[in-house]
Image (spheres, rainbow, N blue to C red):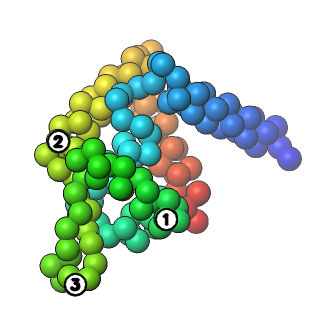
Amino acid sequence: MSKEIKRIEYELTSLIRKAVFRDQSERKIGILERSAYLLMRQLDEHGPSRLKELAEAFQLDISTLSRQAAALESKELIQRFSDPSDGRVSLFDLTELGKEKLAVDSRMRLQWYEGLLEGWSDGEKKMFGELLVRMNGAFDE
C-alpha cells in the first residue's frame, strides 16, 4: 500500500471519529440529531419522498428509516400523506415547523464550518468541496 493511501485512510478514520464524537457531545453543532438533519435536508432538497426512496438514498434498511421518520413525525417535523398517484403509498415531507428547525440548524452548522475553515482560501474550500463530493460518490458505487 502506498503511503498516500495509508495517510488518507488514517485521516478519514480520524475525521469520522471526531465528527461522531462532536455530534454526540455537549459541543454538538445544531439542535437536530445527525440522522434527523440528513433526512430533513433530503426532503428539503428533493421534495416529498416515499420511504423506499429515502432508504435507498441513505443506503439504510426501510425499517431503520421508518423508525427515524416516525420519530420526526411524532415531533411534527415531517408529515406523512397519501401519494396522489397511488393512494396505497405514503409520501413524507417537511412540515412548516420542520422547515423552521432545519433552517436554524443549517445556519448554525454553516456558521460553525465557516469558522472552522476561516484560514482557508476560497480555492482551497472549493477544491475540498469537490474532493468531498467525489469521495462521497465513490462510496455510492
Which of the pair 42/74 is nearer the observer?
Answer: 74
Q: Is residue 44 visible?
A: no
Q: Give me the residue at 47% from left, 49% from top.
A: 133
Helix, strand or loop under label 2: helix
Q: Is residue 50 left or right of residue 12?
A: left
- Closer to the observer: label 1 or label 3? 1
What's under tag 1, amino acid-wise? Ser
Instruction: Tell me if mark 3 has few (under 14), some (14-19) or many (20+) residues whose alpha carbon lies within 10 angstroms of its own.
Output: few
Lower sequence index among marks 1 and 2: 1
Q: Is residue 32 left or right of residue 61?
A: left
Looking at the rendering, in which quadrant would you find the C terminus? bottom right
Q: Are marks 1 and 3 in contact (CB under 8 Å)?
A: no
Q: Is residue 65 visible?
A: yes
> Which residue lies under the disc numbered 2?
97
> Which residue lies under the disc numbered 1?
63
> Which residue lies under the disc numbered 3?
86
Give the vertical position of 121 relative to 96 (above or below): above
Q: Give me the residue at 36% from left, 28% from top.
A: 30
Instruction: Tell me if mark 1 has few (under 14), some (14-19) or many (20+) residues whose alpha carbon lies within 10 angstroms of its own.
Output: few
Which of the pair 107/91 is nearer the observer?
Answer: 91
Pick out the residue farthest to the right: 1
| Residue 123: x %, y % from top left | 42, 30
What's under tag 2, amino acid-wise? Leu
